[in-house]
Amino acid sequence: MFVSDGADILHADLDAFYASVEQRDDPRLRGRPVIVGAGVVLAASYEARAHGVRSAMGGREAARRCPHAVVVPPRWQAYVEASRAVFAVLETVAPRVERLSIDEAFLDVGGLERIAGSPPEIAARLRREVRERAGLPITVGVARTKMLAKVASGVAKPDGLLVVAPAEEAAFLHPLPVERLWGVGAVTARRLHARGITTVGEIAGLGEPALVDMFGRAAGRSLHALAFNRDPRPVRSGKRGRRSVGAQSALGRARPRSPEVLDAVLAGLVDRVTRRMRAGGRVGRTVTLRLRFGDFARVTRSRTVPRATAAHHAILGTARELLAAAMPLVERRGLTLIGVAVSNLEADGGAGQLALPLDRPTAPAVDEVLDDVRERFGPGALTRAKLLRDGAVPDWTDLDDP
């Protein structure tokens, strides 16, 4: 796998994204500590962070640390529209843009020097155009690898630009705390600290065998490689996917489930499937419903729709129609398992919505924000209200066809 000898990978990361959108849209909030979300902090402006407020912190603790902060409710549609405006800029800057989330991406600007300038010049222009066209601050790290570019942008925040030249990689990386390494979370950091290891340079000095003993073969080798900036992953503007993405839930035989509970289980399965499709950059056209009856006989029902999608509401609408058609069989024979799969997959070209008469135009935007919150705070951070119904929380099994 080819890795450039030059620092031509950019990591672009919007600063305190949700809070910055609020400050952009309401001039009264500029320069003031802003917290998005009351019960749990979804985002905090840098003015609030200066008082110790952090994302995922409880609202009471945030209020205690920064009692004069302005707390605003989240405006999901505004964040999605702002993200789209930013990515429209990124896509004019580089031919390969790999989206990581609603507010960050990698760009490969290798080979563009004659037509667009050096990587630092491109990064500076990117920051300027995002500010002018989207009205938001963005930090950019420039380095030879994706890992180091992301580390550089983290060090440069807020609203900064940091270039790490190949000859300066070790001098930049090794003095940093271990938490700066991409992939080192709280658990790994605690284990390292327990051994007296606090910097990336100290990880590098341990040697691979010692790290393998501490963390296992795969994690130890990866940690050792990252400490020396060995990261061969290229910037990918699209991902190869599986032939289908699916999930199923065993319902058991203890008692029959009401149609309302079955609908809630179906909604949960579709939520899981479509979230994984969007994470993989895939959309699909064929929805398959899998049923196992009380006598353990199985049936499948499928429908292919006109346009490929990964939108929750669109896939769920088709799955509901399939389940409704099968309900006479379910009522006669009972149901012990239900599954949903989406096939005829293709790379997401941005359509993402079926031409259905009841489609809500904001639903894909809601999906996008839900994905971002779950990525930041964990898959359990948000649950669709329908899944809170008694007996509707499924015991999921993923069913992918590679």
Image: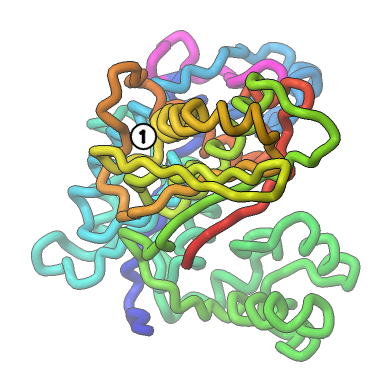
Tell me where residue 121 sits by quadrant. bottom left
Q: Position of residue 289 (x, y in %)?
A: 50, 42
Q: Residues within 10 Å of mark 1 (few under 14, many from 20)?
A: many
For image coordinates 35% across by 54% down, the residue present is 345
Measuring 68% from the left and 37% from the top, which residue is drawn there? Answer: 335
In this image, 115 relative to 205: left or right? left
Residue occupying the far right of the picture: 194
In the image, taking residue 262 as reference, residue 155 lies left or right, namely left
Q: Residue furthest top?
A: 28
Magenta region: which residues?
A: 24-41
**Closer to the camera, 117 or 375?**
375
Query: Is residue 367 visible to the viewer in this orientation of the structure?
Result: no
- Whether the magenta-drawn stretch holds residue 33 is answered as yes
In the displayed structure image, the side of residue 80 where residue 225 appears, left or right: right
Amino acid type for the residue under numbered disc 1: Ser
Image quadrant where one finds the N terminus = bottom left
Does the magenta-highlighted stretch encompass residue 304?
no
Which quadrant of the figure has residue 205?
bottom right
Q: Is residue 287 left or right of residue 4?
A: right
* Residue at left offset 41%, top offset 32%: 318
- Rendered location of residue 3, percent (x, y): 37, 80
Q: Is residue 402 above or below residue 35?
A: below
Task: Please provide percent x and percent y for residue 343.
Answer: 39, 53
Q: Vertical placement of 67 versus 90: above or below?
A: above
Asked whether 356 or 161 is in front, the reply is 356
Residue 166 appears in view: yes
The spot of residue 80 in percent (x, y) is 39, 29
Q: Please give the name of the residue rendered at 50% of the width and 47% of the height, measured from the top-left corner.
A: 300
Residue topped by disc 1:
83
Q: Quadrant of residue 14?
A: top left
Determine the secondary structure under disc 1. Answer: helix
